[in-house]
Image (cartoon, rainbow, N blue to C red):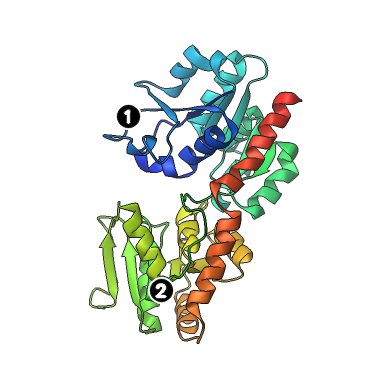
């Protein structure tokens, strides 16, 4: 069965995230032939050699719909991402020329604002709804949005949270937690609210260190440049180096104003980090509900975030035991082996039905 992921912006790093891991698990665990179709956006795609060995890749120079014009009849499942004009073109074209029995799987990667745009009664909202109509399987990453979308799109909908990648055969153990608050992402962008985090951390006077890992937007101005406890790590490309930082941190702070998911939340929780996030991150609610550990504040509420940091860091808790509990819950429920299985079952059900 040929499963084609048409994602023209694919980079090497995407191969160990949902874009690459979903087809990889379908190939490794369920025997699908899985092909990534993309423009060449990186010098190399090294993860294809080891991390996701068995995935195939095909580079295109033109638009995705040109690839579909030539190849649609060979494809059993077309996997596309996001609700945009390109997805609409591709789904419409595939629907017209595909062979009988072929399916479209649409992964939304949606946040709350994306849901509102879908429901808007304007041309953009119409295009998004038409794209939804063309799909046979539609997955969304968070429970709240799944429940909302299921009311309208019924059995097309699938709750498929993002997973986390690991080669380990057991959850993290014996973590030596330090007085570190960590955040990871594209720092200084509007979505990530890095300024809010820094102000809240500085105001908390908690005695911890704040480590910020990731590239920093050129126009970002650090609101507390003289605080020696605020440490910019830069972008950490070495996966094991970043994982070591997750292992050392007690708290992972993710104060985003909006997120579709935030895979770094799972990476952090898989290393036992206590999550502090905001109402703008629906996935944080799901993860905290699963682990029983964490806190949610309002978006951009510096006082509330500072208070939460102060409360958590001053508590007399067994951080290493808490970390093991969190890591075990994530390992048992959130690896891609677990999250992809319902998609496989839905595909087989539709194929056999």
Give the residue at x 50% y 63%. 269
Q: Could you tell me residue 25's position as x and y percent?
A: 54, 38
Q: Residues within 10 Å of mark 1 (few under 14, many from 20)?
A: some
Give the residue at x 55% y 51%. 335
Q: Could you tell me residue 42's position as x and y percent?
A: 30, 35
Give the residue at x 45% y 18%. 67
Q: From what the image shows, is residue 260 above or below residue 316?
A: above
Residue 40, labelled with which disc? 1
- Is 186 displayed left or right of 317 in the figure? left
- Is 341 displayed left or right of 297 in the figure? right
Q: Which residue is mark 2?
A: 176
207 or 163, nearer to the observer = 163
Q: From what the image shows, is residue 148 above or below residue 67?
A: below
Q: From what the image shows, is residue 79 above or below residue 160?
A: above
Could you tell me which quadrant the N terminus lies in?
Answer: top right
Q: Could you tell me residue 350's position as x and y percent?
A: 71, 28
Question: Mark 1 and mark 2: span between their CA atoms?
Answer: 41 Å
First in sequence, mark 1 or 2: give its number.
Answer: 1
Regarding mark 1 in the picture, which secondary structure is present there? loop
- Nearer the observer: mark 1 or 2; the answer is 2
Which quadrant holds residue 244? Answer: bottom left
Which quadrant holds residue 108? Answer: top right
Regarding mark 2 in the picture, which secondary structure is present there? loop
């Amino acid at each position: 069965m040929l499963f084609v992921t048409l994602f023209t912006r694919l980079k090497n790093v995407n191969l160990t995230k949902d874009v690459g891991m979903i087809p990889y698990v379908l190939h490794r665990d369920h025997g699908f032939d899985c092909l990534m179709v993309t423009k060449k956006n990186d010098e190399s795609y090294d993860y294809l050699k080891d991390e996701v060995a068995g995935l195939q890749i095909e580079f295109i120079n033109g638009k995705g719909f040109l690839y579909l014009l030539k190849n649609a009849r060979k494809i059993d499942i077309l996997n596309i991402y996001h609700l945009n004009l390109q997805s609409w073109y591709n789904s419409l074209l595939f629907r017209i020329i595909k062979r009988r029995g072929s399916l479209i799987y649409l992964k939304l990667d949606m946040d709350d604002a994306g849901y509102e745009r879908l429901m808007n009664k304007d041309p953009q909202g119409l295009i998004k709804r038409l794209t939804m109509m063309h799909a046979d399987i539609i997955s969304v990453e968070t429970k709240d949005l799944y429940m909302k979308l299921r009311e309208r799109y019924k059995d097309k909908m699938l709750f498929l949270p993002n997973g986390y990648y690991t080669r380990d055969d057991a959850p993290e153990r014996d973590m030596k937690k330090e007085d570190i608050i960590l955040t990871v992402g594209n720092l200084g962008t509007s979505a990530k609210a890095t300024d809010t985090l820094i102000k809240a951390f500085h105001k908390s006077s908690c005695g911890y260190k704040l480590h910020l890992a990731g590239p920093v937007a050129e126009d970002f101005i650090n609101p507390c440049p003289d605080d020696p406890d605020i440490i910019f790590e830069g972008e950490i490309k070495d996966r094991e180096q970043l994982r070591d930082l997750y292992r050392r941190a007690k708290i992972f702070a993710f104060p985003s104003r909006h997120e579709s998911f935030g895979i770094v939340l799972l990476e952090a929780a898989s290393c036992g980090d206590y999550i502090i996030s905001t109402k703008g991150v629906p996935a944080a609610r799901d993860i905290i509900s699963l682990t029983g550990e964490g806190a949610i504040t309002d978006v951009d509420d510096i006082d509330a975030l500072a208070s939460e940091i102060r409360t958590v860091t001053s508590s007399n808790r067994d951080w290493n035991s808490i970390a093991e509990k969190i890591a075990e819950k994530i390992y048992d429920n959130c690896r891609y082996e677990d999250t992809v299985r319902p998609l496989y079952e839905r595909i087989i059900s539709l194929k056999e039905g």
